[in-house]
Image: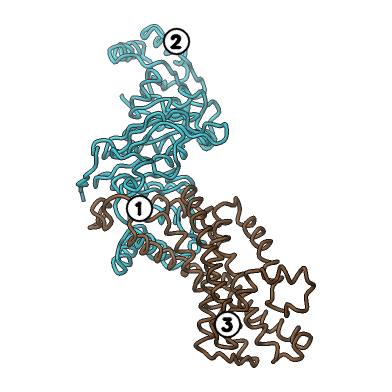
Chain colours: A brown, B cyan
Amino acid sequence: MNGSANRMDGPYPGGAAGFGQAVRNSLTMAYRALLKVKHTPELWFDVTLQPILFTLMFAYLFGGAIAGDVRGYLPIIIPGILVQTVITTSIVTGVQLREDMEKGVFDRFRSLPIARIAPLAGALMADSIRYAIASVLTFTVGYLIGYRPAGGLGYVAVAAALVIVCAWSVSWIFAFFGVSARTASGVQGVSMLVLLPLTILSNAFVPVETLPNWLQWFVKLNPVSHLVSAVRDLANAGTFSRELAISLAGAAAIVAVFAPLTVRVYMRRA
Amino acid sequence: MRRSFPLHVPNAELAVEARGLVKAFGDRRAVDGADLTVRTGTIFGVLGPNGAGKTTTLKMLATLLRPDGGEARIFGYDAVRDAHRVRRLIGVTGQYASVDETLTARENLIVFSRLLGLGRGEARRRASELLERFGLADAADRQLKTFSGGMRRRLDLAASLIVTPPLLFLDEPTTGLDPRTRAQLWEMIRELVRSGSTVLLTTQYLEEADQLADRIAVIDRGRVVAEGTADELKASVGASSLELAVRHAKDLAEARRVVEETLRVRTAAMPESGRITAPAADADRLADLLIALRERGIGLAEISVRKPTLDEVFLAITGRTAVGNREERGTGSPGFAQDHDPEREVVV
């Protein structure tokens, strides 16, 4: 009470929150998400341990069978693992959003004069950092076991950025599950059910030519395959291919559909 | 410390004005036409048993729930249409601590401060100030997981006071607190109101409403069944009662006869304690009674007039006792706490 401003002469006069305030509030919420991670590091196992474990596992398990040796398999598998890991990570957005909304602290957020979208936007922002960590780790482990992407560091960075953007877009789908589901475990279940076939039934781990025709049809259609191809073209060949355009268009389409849906459901519940 | 809010609001007189609030969950009407009026600068108590609709009512007023019917105005702003404006004027402390479990106390306050528009340094300073004031400085950098219920409550309240809200909602602020922490919290609430804020609190503790609230609304099954000051509510139940204790047990029967004759009422006697209870007479008759007793040489150990307790009010209004309260005091018959009576006023 000593000397604090009361809310009427506070920094945000007027009606609903403006864009500037929305950005500031969202950044604060992202900061909060990062603080949470600081205290519960196990929340980041999926973006730290998983890329390391999966890269090593798949490289040595399938390397000989698919490409003759591990070294030859790396240009195929590293982009595959990258996409698979980072996209899978985006599920957490929905689960954590749901968990958050069930807690008492959410009542406080809702009673504060902040932009309504901030808790959602903040969560999505903080998750981009998770994707970045997973990307860096996957490439690093790949490099350590002998992956030398021909595209060079610049193109690898672009490839990582592409995956981060796409994962962020996909996380809107799970955010939608998150805001509409009744329980956090429900979100987890539904999300895995959607994601597993998409990431496994793709060109991430095996050459498409080895698959039966009907499966080839699905795999070629699968957006994850396009993303994996785009990453391979960037990292291994240093080219911006048509796959890149397809991936970005797909990401944009997902955001265009799911962002408004999510925001609408979220605002109604929040 | 006194500080009034230069409120530029449509209605600076009435902090809360609710008419016919309704909220249904499925086919159960949790709140069924509640009316509330809270004057600015007062403490208003919403009293009721578990499940009476207190929290739901509070949530509608605090923009956390959208009413299915009726309307609520906070300082004249509609709680639904002008929700964002209302949120600038209120603070809410929920029944279940509305703070972040995984963060430390300090981080919680910093995050909320930043959300309220304080700068980085300002947020840090404010957090430290509040931690100090709420006796949490030692625990400031511990995660809330390790906090006791009382510490959580205090942090929760601190979070609601980052910027002093003109209107503060407190949902059962002292439930589960030890008496000392409860007393501290009461003092903080009083101080807040002295400095110009308005407080609406829910409670199932009759004593809390009695001690703190300027006005009390008794809510039962989603409706406000009585409203007034604690005294008015007690008066509405009926007259006060007179209690006498004779010095010598052998005088009990005689004394009882004298009381019944002088006051022309029926009395109840408790031979074990040598007590007589009667509906309180007016003061003149009381003087006659004392003289009559002295004339007969009956010595009195004690004489008192007590108003009905809020327990009795509650029982009379709702036909039930406040849940949990009775058991704690451990008396048998609900509503007539003879041996533990905070309302006794000794007149002689």
Answer with mark 3 or mark 1, whichever residue precedes in sequence. Answer: 1
In this image, A63 relative to B247: left or right?
A: right
Residue at image point 41% right, 47% down? B182
The correct choice, above or below, for A150 with respect to A98 in the image is below
Kind of residue at badge 3: Leu
- Compared with A114, B273 (above or below) is above
Residue A247 % position (x, y) = 56, 72
Residue A251 figure quarter: bottom right
Three-letter code, disc 2: Arg
Residue at the disc numbered 3: A137
> Residue B189, labelled with which disc?
none
Alpha carbon distance from label 1 to label 2: 60 Å
| Residue A113: numbered disc | 1
The answer to whether residue A43 is left or right of residue A67 is left
Q: Secondary structure at mark 3?
A: helix
Q: Which class describes the residues within 10 Å of circle 3: few (<14), some (14-19), or many (20+)? A: many
x, y percentage for residue B286? Answer: 31, 14
Mark 2 surroundings: few (<14), some (14-19) or many (≥20) residues within 10 A? few
Subunit ID for the residue under disc 1: A
Judge whether B188 appears above or below A258 on screen: above
- Disc 2: which residue: B266
